[in-house]
Image (cartoon, grey):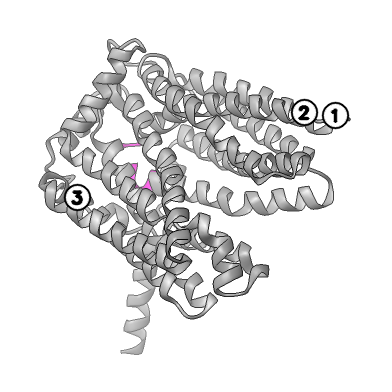
Amino acid sequence: MGDWALVTWTDRFRAMRMDVTPLRESRDFRLLFTAGSVFYLGSMVAYVAVPFAIYDLTGSNLMVGLVGLVELGPLVVFGLYGGALADHVDRRRLLVATGVAQVALMGAFAWNAFSAQPRVWLIFVIAALYAAVSSMQRPSREALEPRTVRHDQIAAANALSSFAMQFGVLLGPLVGGLLVAYVGVGWCFVAGLVGYSVATLLFAAMRPYPHDGETTPPSLRGIHEGLTYAVRRRDLLGTYLVDIAAMMLAIPVVLFPALAHEVFDRPELLGVLYSAETVGALVATALSGWVGRVHHHGRAIVIAASLYGACIALAGLMPSFWLACLFLALSGAADMVSAVFRSTVWNQTIPDTMRGRLAGIEMLSYSVGPMVGEARAGFVADAWSVRGAIVSGGVACVGGVLLTAAALRDFWSYDSRTDAHAVAERERRAAGPTSA
C-alpha cells in the first residue's frame, strides 16, 4: 500500500511539472524564450535605476512620481500603434528594430549617469522615448509567440514565458539594488544595455515571419477594427474585464511601504512584501504541467482571479507579517494561473491578422490598470486605513470578477475544444504554412 501510494504521488508530481515540450521542439521558441529571459532581467535592473537616479539628483518624491505620467502618453499611443504595425510588417523585423532602439536608449541613460553633471530633464526625455519604443515592441513579441509553437502547445508556451518574466521581475531588482549600492546607478543601465543587446541578437537569429495574406496598414481605422473585434467577442471581453478588475481594484503594491512601516512595524522586511507575489507566481508556473489538460479556460480564469482577490483581502486581515506574506504569495500564484489561461484564450482564438492589435489592447489593460489601481489604493488608505484599502480592494475584485462571469455567459462557458474561434484557428494552423 505504501509503495503504491508513493508511486501515485510521484506520478502526480511529475504531471504537475512545467511542460518544457515547446523548448525541446521549437528552435524559434527557444530563441524567443531566452531573449525574453534576458530582456526582462535587464529591463528590471534598469527599472530600479531610473527612479533612484531622479531621486538622487532632486531629492523629490514628486519628481519620481512624474516619470509615470511622462510615460503614460507614449505607452497608450504607441502601444495601440505598435499593435496595428505588428499586423502589417514582419514581427521579427519589428522586434529587431525596436531592440536596436532600446539598446541606444540604454546607452543614452548610461552616458547621462556617468557624466560629470547628469541631467534630470534628459532622464525624462529618454524615459518617454523608451516607453514609446517598448510599447511598440511588446505587441509583436506577444503576437509572434503562438506562431513558434504548435496550437496544442500554446498553454505550455505561455507558462514558460510567464516563468521567464517572473524570474526577471524577482531577480532584476535585487541585482539592480546591489549595483546601485556598490558600483553606482550607471552600471544598472549598462546591465540593461547588455541584456537588450543579447535579446536583439536572439531576435535576429529567428527565421522571418511574414504575414500569410493581405494585411491591414497601421491606421486609426485598423486600430478601431481591433477595438471593435475585442468588444464583440464576449469571451475576449471577459478576459479583459477580469484583468481590469484585478488591477484596478485589488493591486496592493503601492501600500507595501505603509504596510511594513505602520501596520507591522517591520520596515527592514519591505523587500519581502515586494517579492512575495513573485515567489508565488514562480511556484505556480513551475507546477503548471496541468494547465494543458484544462479546456474550460473561462471558468479557470474566473476561479483563479476570484482566489487572487480573496487572498489579497486575507493578506490585509492577517495579524502577523509572515501570514500576510503567505497570502500575498498565494495571490501571486492565483494571478499567474489567471494570466496563463487569459493568454491561452487570446493565442488560441485570435486570428493572426488581428493578433498584434489585440496584443496592443491587452497591453494597455494591464499597464494602465495598475496606475489607476495605485491611485485608488492610496486614496482609500488615506481616507480609511491601510488594512481597509487592501481588504476592500480584494473583496471588490471578487465581486467584479463574479459579476463579469454572470454577465458574460460566453466567457464562463468557453471550451477550447468546441469554441468556434478556437476550432477555426486550430484548423487553420494545421493546414497552413505557419504551423510550427
Q: Quadrant of the N terminus?
A: bottom left
User: What residue lies at 54% left-to-right and 75% top-to-bottom?
Assistant: 321
Res. 421 visible in picture = yes
Nearer-the-camera pick, 55 or 426: 55
Marks 3/2 in contact by CB < 8 Å: the verdict is no
**Disc 1 residue type?**
Ser
Question: Disc 3 to disc 2, how far (Cα)?
Answer: 47 Å
| Of 332 and 264, the residue lying toward us | 264
SS of the residue under disc 2: loop
Q: Amino acid at mark 3?
A: Thr
Mark 2 highlights which residue?
Answer: 119
Label 1 close to label 2 by CB (< 8 Å): yes
Residue 152 visible to an observer of this rendering? no
Residue projecting furthest to the right? 116
Q: Are there few (<14), some (14-19), or many (20+) residues within 10 Å of tag 3? A: many
Mark 2 neighbour class, 10 Å CA radius: few under 14, some 14 to 19, many 20 or more: some
Report the magenta stretch's main SS: helix
Determine the residue positioned at 30% across, 36% down: 347
Location of residue 228 in the rendering, given as x and y in whole percent from the top left corner:
21, 25
Q: Circle 1: is it few (<14), some (14-19), or many (20+) Cα within 10 Å?
A: few
Q: Which mark is residue 404?
A: 3
Q: Is residue 202 above or below residue 366?
A: above
Q: Which residues are magenta?
A: 149-157
Sequence-wise first label, 3 or 1: 1
Q: With 271 as the anchor, is 263 left or right in this view?
A: left
In the picture of the structure, the residue carrying the numbered disc 1 is 115
Measured as percent of width and height from the top left, residue 84 is found at 36, 19
Amino acid at pointer 2: Arg
